[in-house]
Amino acid sequence: MTLAELSIPQSWEAITPEWMTTALGSHHPGVVVDRVRVALRDDGTNRRARLELSYAAGSGPATVFAKAVDPAHAELVALTSGLYHEPRLFASEVPLPLDHPAVYVALIDEERADFLMIMEDVVARGGDPRDSTRPMTVDQAASGVRGLARLHSQYWGDRLTRHPALGWVEPFVAFDGLQYAPLDIARERLGDAVPAEIPALSGEELFVDIWARYIATLTGPSSPQTLLHGDPHIGNTYVLPDDEAGFLDWQMVRRGNFSLDLGYFLQGALTIEQRRRSERELLEEYRDALTLPAEEMPSAAEMLLRYRASVAHGLAIWMATLSGGDAWQRPEICLALVQRYAQAFVDLDTRAAIDAIA
């Protein structure tokens, strides 16, 4: 069997040793897998599994992580995330100069609206997946912003738009559906845990006047474009033993203004007090890590303005998620993130910042 002959198995149990041998072959020449066992599965909007491997010859990873779409949710994923964005990104083999899981194979079956990725299990090299209940330290967040700066620098401006392997990357635009979130659920759950200004927002104000207006600035004529991770909230990160931050789940990859990645990551990765104390230094950390010609470098003032506006995205996404009850994320994860983005919205006067750039 060759890599070109691989098709997408219809269940984790249908992944045979021969199939996995072929999938790993380009990264681990000479390996022969003799056993594949499903050690853990999590079948939600996407299907995920940790697979344990043993070998008849050669050496390879003891575990790999598998990700595929659940056909029942393919339409929803296509609407909000882009069904094939992550496998296309890794199939293109473009360099991503920040820590991320190695991808051994990325397959797409458009006829069946399906994809499958076999990738590194970062836990095997000490990766510690994070969520909002386990915020980063300032040093770990600094590593994250430096990584994002390296990614953004590599594909800033026409470095992205003229890249032959990335012509499929879409602009980040406001997607439909958030306006239907039942905000009463979020308001009830929040109580008085956020500034009073936040529960007072109507759906029209939050999702149209604030969120959609900000999103429209990401691809405006005066906005520098780059390759965006698109969804770098803390739940899509991990920390390595040396405090290097890495990024998972590239399904929302898009092109647009750097501020979406920078703000969405930073405002959610730290506690409110950590952010208040350190965000200006971390913005400078990001700017210092950009490797751009002077004429392309955003000024410190522009960076701060766009960063202030970017709170709109985190606040809207997590208010909508909190309004979904327990269907999407655990309540304590949602609450912590809404509190962080809500306080940042007030602290940074996000409305005024959006007015200044919209």
Image (cartoon, rainbow, N blue to C red):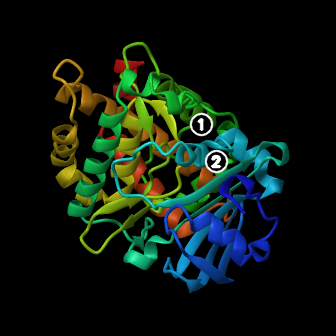
Let me know if residue 193 appears in the view.
Answer: no
Q: Which image quarter is the N terminus in?
A: bottom right
* Element on which disc 1 rests: loop
The answer to whether 112 is drawn above or below residue 175 in the figure is below
- Residue under the image location 32 percent in, 61 percent down: 245
Observer-nearest residue: 193 or 301? 301
3D distance between C-alphas at marks 2 and 1 = 8 Å
Looking at the rendering, which quadrant does residue 111 occupy?
top right
Q: Which residue is mark 1?
A: 202
The answer to whether 133 is drawn above or below residue 350 in the figure is below
- In the picture provided, is 20 more to the left or to the right than 250? right
Categorize mark 2 by other alpha carbons within 10 Å: few (<14), some (14-19), many (20+): many
- In the picture provided, is 64 more to the left or to the right than 123? right
Residue type at tag 2 = Leu
Let me know if residue 29 appears in the view.
Answer: yes
Q: Position of residue 298 (x, y in %)?
A: 23, 25
- Residue under the image location 35 percent in, 42 percent down: 151
- Residue under the image location 60 percent in, 78 percent down: 32
Observer-nearest residue: 268 or 140? 140
Categorize mark 1 by other alpha carbons within 10 Å: few (<14), some (14-19), many (20+): some
Instruction: Identify the mark at residue 15; answer none if there is no mark.
Output: none
Residue type at tag 1 = Ser
- In the picture provided, is 233 more to the left or to the right than 316? left
Q: Number of callouts in the render?
A: 2
Q: Which residue is mark 2?
A: 183
CB-based contact (under 8 Å), mark 2 and mark 1: yes
- Residue under the image location 42 percent in, 13 percent down: 221
Q: Position of residue 137 (x, y in %)?
A: 25, 66
* Element on which disc 2 rests: helix
